[in-house]
Image (cartoon, rainbow, N blue to C red):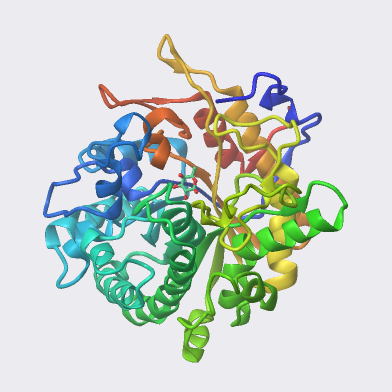
Amino acid sequence: MSNPASPPAASVLAERPPLTFPPGFLWGAATAAYQVEGAAAVGGRTPSIWDTFSHTPGRVVAGHTGDVACDHYHRLDWDVALMAELGLKSYRFSVSWPRVQPGGTGPINQEGLDFYRRLVDQLLANGIEPWLTLYHWDLPQPLEDAGGWPARDTAARFADYATLVAGALGDRVRYWTTLNEPWCSAFLGYGSGVHAPGRSDPADAVRAGHHLLLGHGLAVPAVRAAARSDVEVGVTLNLYPVIPATDSPGDADAARRIDALANRFFLDPLLRGSYPADLISDLSRVTDFGHVRAEDLTAIAAPLELVGINYYSRHVVAAPAAAAPPEPYWRKPSCWPGSEGVRFVTRGMPVTDMDWEIDPPGLVETLRRVHEEYTDLPLYITENGSAFVDVVVDGQVDDPDRTAYFDAHLRAAHQAIAAGVPLRGYFAWSLLDNFEWAWGYTKRFGMIHVDYRSQARTLKASGRWYAETIRRNGLAAE
Ligand code: FCB
């Protein structure tokens, strides 16, 4: 729900001069398999943890599931035609693991793979660079039944799956990302349990995070070995600037803790080859990190060609309330193991329909931080976008708040480039309205409106604006 007291999102910007992006900047849009494909039981696909979770009463708003979603599986031609109409230079999609390797082990399912072959071929025929994500949260259910990401073997299964997909599509797909947002898979999936598989155990959440990282580290050389020689391999992280609500030492400590769990838990092993010492100490009540073998960190820090960053908002945090609740609060399901009492505060800034504060400067800070503190690698914004309530009037969707959100964040991206960040591309989230996880179909992020009853697609005003932005490789003065 949007906050009625906050000013309209379109007011975030005062002045908007024209801006041009570097030549070759990769303009794209993103989706994920479970969110758009539907065809859940078609062509040999078997259930993933999201099928099981969404079919469990009470897990997803209104009992929505991804059974049909945008029916993208059957409407591929139409959707690629829309991408071409937008003038996309790249399309970021994910492969459904249980579609191409039902059950998560064994040989490839040709029928499932054929869908992605057709997708990739159609993209290439339209001059759209395919950008493939191997894992956007849809773990095959039998692998969860065998322990899921808290089990070490899942990392090896993921590397096998990566080998299969890279062997099949690696000749045509140049850009590969292993995982999408491992923080969500680990800490929402196994910590708070608000995402599939819906388990809540702080130690399991930390183990899941490690095995996701290990799976990435094993998949990187697997992809490189099987794919074309100019392959570019990376990973996508959801990063947040984390700032204290006040300058009190307690709030500063809260910010350090949340930064460690949200950001450095992933950035440090991937780009420095070690877990941060303060994170290990913050988690001492939860785990002794006995699940980490020395050789894991070498694997996790496998050399990459790029880093993908998903950016939506910023975290503002405060120390736990002075009067702790009587029952130890850390027994409650939380996505912040070891730091369960930290409070998340809002600043009264404009928010999206997710209630996420709109904070474009946070994107500049995030990009600069990754570049200045971690790596010289090319960076890509692999997701950025906003949910707003849309209405179709006379076949049109006028969504100025979404356009303003894109505009403000692209200006922030440009500012980061001017500050020396090697930012090479931007993917709007999302191409289509889609299944927004625990929120089902109640949150619309698309540049294209989807009527879920008729499956009609309507290009929103923000989509037309984005097409124009791509065409001019930059932003007009407003
Ligand atoms: C990201 C997810 C993506 C979508 C957006 C809104 O965390 O990667 O699938 O749900 O949020």
Which quarter of the rendering shows the N terminus?
top right
Using the image as rendered, state which of residue 345 and residue 453 is in the foreground: 345
Residue located at (66% from left, 75% from top): 281
**Is 467 rendered above or below residue 368?**
above
Q: Is residue 207 left or right of residue 416?
A: left
Residue 433 placed where, x, y %?
A: 41, 33
Residue 327 placed where, x, y %?
A: 57, 51
Residue 413 appears in the figure: no
Residue located at (81% from left, 56% from top): 250
Using the image as rendered, state which of residue 180 and residue 214 is in the foreground: 214
Which quarter of the rendering shows the C terminus?
top right
**Is 404 rendered above or below residue 371?**
above
Residue 475 placed where, x, y %?
A: 67, 38
**Is 272 rendered above or below residue 474?**
below
Q: Which residue is at the far top? A: 394
Q: Which residue is at the far bottom? A: 295
Residue located at (14% from left, 72% from top): 107
